[in-house]
Image (tube, rainbow, N blue to C red):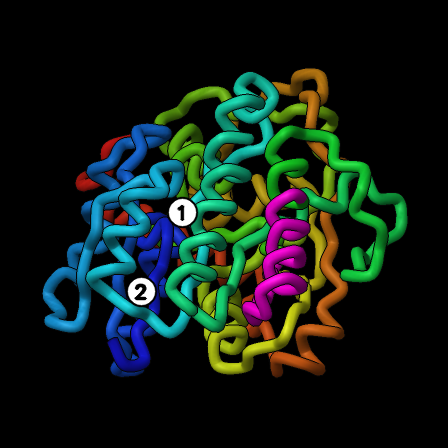
Amino acid sequence: MHDGVLVTGGAGFIGSHLVEALLEEGRDVIAFDNFDDFYDPGIKRTNIATALKSPRFTLVKGDIRDAQQLDECLTTFRPTVIVHLAARAGVRPSVAQPALYQEVNCTGTINVLETARKYGIGQVVFGSSSSVYGANSSVPFREDARADGPISPYAATKRAGELLCHTFHHLYGIKITCLRFFTVYGPRQRPDLAIHKFARLITEGQEVPVYGDGSAQRDLTYIDDILQGVMRAIETPFDFDIFNLGESRTISVTQLINLLEESLGMKADVAFYPPQPGDVPITYADISKARDSLGYNPTTPIEEGIVRFVEWYRATRGNLAE
């Protein structure tokens, strides 16, 4: 397949947007997704409805934990690039199910990398996470900061994925770029993530739970900005490198709720609870390296992004199973 891209997790939030962006560029795209029931699989089917109309798009239902399914996929399709986004996501659920996170995020990543090696795929882009920095006291987070103190199983599995990527590059010469995503939001955002969850609770008049005092800071990145960074990473292969993709500014949970109230035209019934294990006090990306090497340039401030999210949420709410 000339110029083809395999996107694992291609029916998910980020994956489905990436699939559409690649199709718009004229590429052949294979989405490999297991339609996990972590959230309603019907949402994923809605995510890829547009892509399915393209003759250059192929959907393969498969699980990255199953090496044989990946093998069969690569026997049929020979992409030039693999973008590995499939993962068990979420910090808090990982605290309850660490073994499952290890199985999907570590064993699954080994399977993807081994398949790339076996079939001579020369380039892999790996979706990592800002959670690898742990409760890092040095902000903003730089890629050369130590990342050996993860405080959730999810963070540990993402850091393990980066280390596996480095090993496969070193041993087999695969060009691999790891992208550390800082809280991505926007249309199609998973229903369990804060912005989507808060919007639903506010509109339904339910209690909005805040863990801690609301002062936790997050670097929130709009989906279009993340896509720009992923596309640049595909277009610009590095031997091995790691980049932060964030907005490079922070907002507190309280400020975020205020923005949602403003956009929704409704007040939130906020209830405060003790902080949860695995949560970090701040995420804040230093994106100077991505700017210099990838030409990454985020353009959607949180104030604008929230308005766009709420527009999408209102437009699709009746169609979404939540």
Q: Is residue 283 magenta?
A: no
Callout 1: few (<14), some (14-19), or many (20+) C-alpha neighbours within 10 Å? Answer: some
Q: What amino acid type should be assigned to the residue bearing mark 1? A: Gln
Q: Position of residue 32 (x, y in %)?
A: 29, 51
Q: Position of residue 175 (x, y in %)?
A: 57, 71
Q: Nearer the viewer, residue 2 or 171?
A: 171
Is 65 left, or right, of 161 in this rendering?
A: left
> Tags 1 and 2 in contact by the CB under 8 Å rule?
no
Of tags 1 and 2, which is closer to the observer?
2
Query: Where is residue 91, by image quadrant?
Result: top right
Q: Nearer the viewer, residue 180 or 80?
A: 80
**Residue topped by disc 2:** 19
Tell me the quarter of the image containing the N terminus.
bottom left
Residue 189 badge: 1
Identified at 46% across, 67% down, the residue is: 227
Residue stretch rendered in magenta on the structure: 160-179
> CA separation, marks 1 and 2?
15 Å
Is 205 left, or right, of 256 in this rendering?
A: left
Q: Is residue 161 magenta?
A: yes
Tell me the quarter of the image containing the C terminus.
top left
Q: Nearer the viewer, residue 153 or 175?
A: 175
Is residue 247 visible in this depiction of the protein? Answer: no
Q: What is the secondary structure assignment of the residue under circle 1?
A: loop
